[in-house]
Image: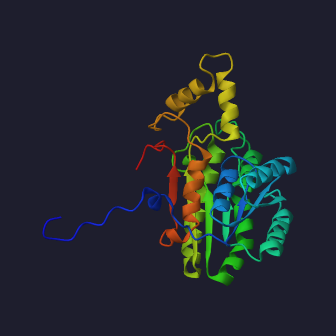
């Protein structure tokens, strides 16, 4: 540069491709971690150096998930637990503490959609059972883990919600309401425990290619041309028209955001709901 200093060259591209999330030696518990979004989150946190614990009801599916994560070169503790049973949750926290000393990160991912149908179709027990799974399990486990985070004055709680909390669908009334309540719980906890260094956020996916969605698409594709690819586009167009790309998201796309929210990089973020929905939610 004439008459002045030469500009510094840009650093190599790889410098921009790595963000240290400072999760090494943090301990993360991921419920429903044997498949789908939960497994992807567990793998992402393990890659970032965290000690990872996964739980699910199926011992066989847990074993498969553990082998898959270990095949990538990462360790994981897999524990059988039904999150709707308080005894199982107590045992889960006890074994996690015995192995790693504490729990720094809690990802409340376990949940389900329950029985679908109109409001008139669902009975009271349908509602009660889904609230037990999608809300009260989160309440119980979070109550067990919060004191451990308070001791360290550091913690991250991520609740896996859904677009249904903000954009309810008429054939999923109980599911819509449980996820709306979960988002309210997220905000409530963020207000109550921020002073203790504990940050609480929700992540709300929509139409993510999990085993459940893949099964649905396979059924839709039966006897039709184009297979599951065509079924995926059909579902996106007809049922989720707000998704601007016209396709399902991946569990890994959810996991990347969760890992960030678990990190030191998110130290000024709490009480928020982050959509990973491809634009599905129509409102701002």
**What residue lies at 82% left-to-right and 72% top-to-bottom?**
99
**What residue lies at 58% left-to-right and 64% top-to-bottom?**
186
**What residue lies at 62% left-to-right and 43% top-to-bottom?**
173
Residue lying farthest to the front in this orientation: 2
Image position, residue 283 (x, y; %): 42, 47
95 and 25: which is toward the camera = 25
**What residue lies at 58% left-to-right and 38% top-to-bottom?**
170
Image position, residue 82 (x, y; %): 82, 56
212 and 102: which is toward the camera = 102
7 and 148: which is toward the camera = 7
Residue 283 left/right relative to 5: right
Query: What kind of colouring is applied to the model shown?
Result: rainbow
Report the quarter where the N terminus lies.
bottom left
Image position, residue 210 (x, y; %): 66, 41
Is 209 placed above or below 226 here?
Answer: below
Image position, residue 250 (x, y; %): 59, 43
């Amino acid at each position: 540069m004439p008459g002045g200093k030469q500009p510094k060259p840009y650093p190599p591209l790889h410098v921009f491709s790595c963000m240290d999330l400072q999760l090494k030696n943090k301990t993360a518990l991921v419920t429903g971690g044997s498949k789908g979004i939960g497994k992807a989150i567990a793998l992402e946190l393990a890659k970032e150096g965290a000690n990872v614990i996964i739980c699910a009801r199926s011992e066989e599916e847990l074993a498969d998930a553990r082998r898959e994560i270990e095949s990538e070169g990462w360790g994981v503790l897999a524990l059988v637990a039904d999150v709707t049973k308080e005894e199982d949750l107590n045992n889960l926290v006890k074994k996690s503490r015995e192995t790693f000393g504490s729990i720094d990160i809690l990802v409340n991912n376990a949940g389900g959609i329950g029985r679908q149908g109109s409001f008139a179709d669902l009975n009271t027990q349908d509602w009660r059972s889904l609230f037990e799974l999608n809300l009260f399990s989160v309440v119980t486990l979070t109550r067990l883990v919060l004191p451990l985070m308070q001791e360290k004055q550091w913690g991250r709680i991520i609740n896996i919600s859904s677009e249904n909390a903000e954009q309810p669908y008429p054939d999923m009334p109980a599911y819509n309401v449980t996820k709306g309540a979960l988002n309210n719980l997220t905000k409530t906890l963020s207000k109550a425990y921020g002073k203790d260094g504990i940050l609480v956020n929700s992540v709300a996916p929509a139409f993510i290619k999990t085993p459940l969605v893949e099964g649905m698409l396979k059924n839709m594709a039966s006897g039709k041309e184009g297979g599951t690819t065509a079924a995926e586009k059909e579902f996106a167009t007809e049922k989720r028209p707000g998704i601007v790309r016209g396709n399902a998201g991946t569990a890994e796309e959810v996991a990347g955001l969760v890992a960030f929210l678990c990190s030191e990089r998110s130290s000024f973020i709490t009480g928020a709901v982050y959509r990973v929905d491809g634009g599905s939610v129509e409102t701002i």
